[in-house]
Image: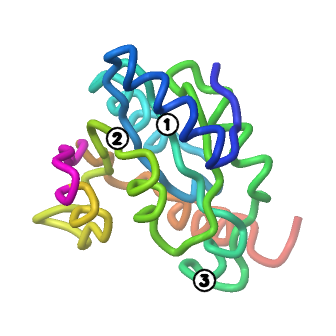
Amino acid sequence: MGRVVSPEEALRIREELRAAGKTVVLTNGHFDLLHLGHVRCLQQAKKLGDVLFVGVNSDASTRLLKGERRPIVPEDERARLVAALECVDYVVIFEERTARRLVELLKPDIYAKGGDYGPAGKELPEAEAVAAYGGEVRILPYLPGRSTTDIIRTILERYGGGT
C-alpha cells in the first residue's frame, strides 16, 4: 500500500531511489470513479520497475480537462484510493493540465500511460519531457469499454432522473 506525498517529498524519495539504483516508474491520471481499467494499468506499470509513483490530477485540473461537473470524487479521496492499491508505492497530486512538470521533477526511468495514448491514440504531451532526459515511454494495453465516462453514462441510462 502506498502513501500520498507532496511533490517535494516525492523528489526527495526519488533521489534516494536513484542513489539505490532502483528503477522508478511514473504514470498519472484523474482516477475519478476508480475502475478495473485503472487498476490493470497500474498493475502493468508496477511490473515495469521497482517503485511506482502515480500522479493524480487535482480537482481544478480535472475540471479544466473533463468539464465543470467533474470530478465526482474529490482529489484527496482519489489519491487515497489509488494509494490503497497494493501495486502503488507513492501518489502525488498535481495541479497542471498535464503531468509534464511532474515528469520533469521526478525524471522517472519509465513513464507509462494507457493504450488510449501513443501512436494509435491521443497525443502524449509528456513524451517530449521524457525524451529530454533520456527516459523511456511505455504505452500499456488498453481495456476497452472501461472508462469513467462509460460508467457515468451507464448510471444515467439506468437511473436517469430517479432513485
x and y percentages locating residue 126 in the rendered image:
31, 64
Mark number for residue 108? 2
Crowding near the residue tagged with mark 1, few <14, some 14–19, many ≥20 C-alpha atoms within 10 Å: many
Q: Which residues are magenta?
A: 131-140
Q: Is residue 67 above or below residue 42?
A: below
The label shown at residue 53 is 1
Residue visible at 34% across and 40% down in the picture: 108
To which quarter of the image does residue 91 belong?
top right
Disc 1 residue type (three-letter): Phe
The C terminus: image quadrant: bottom right
What amino acid type is highlighted by mark number 3?
Answer: Leu
Between residues 69 and 98, which one lies in front from this camera angle? Answer: 98
In the image, 109: left or right of 3? left
State the image coordinates of residue 74 (x, y, percent, origin top left): 79, 59
Label 3: how many Cα within 10 Å (few below 14, some 14–19, many 20+):
few
Taking the image as shown, residue 69 lies to the left or right of residue 104, namely: right
Residue corresponding to mark 3: 64
In the rendered view, tell whether residue 158 sits above or below residue 146: below
How are the residues colored?
Answer: rainbow
Circle 2 SS class: loop
The spot of residue 131 in percent (x, y) is 17, 57
Q: CA distance from mark 3 to mark 2?
A: 26 Å
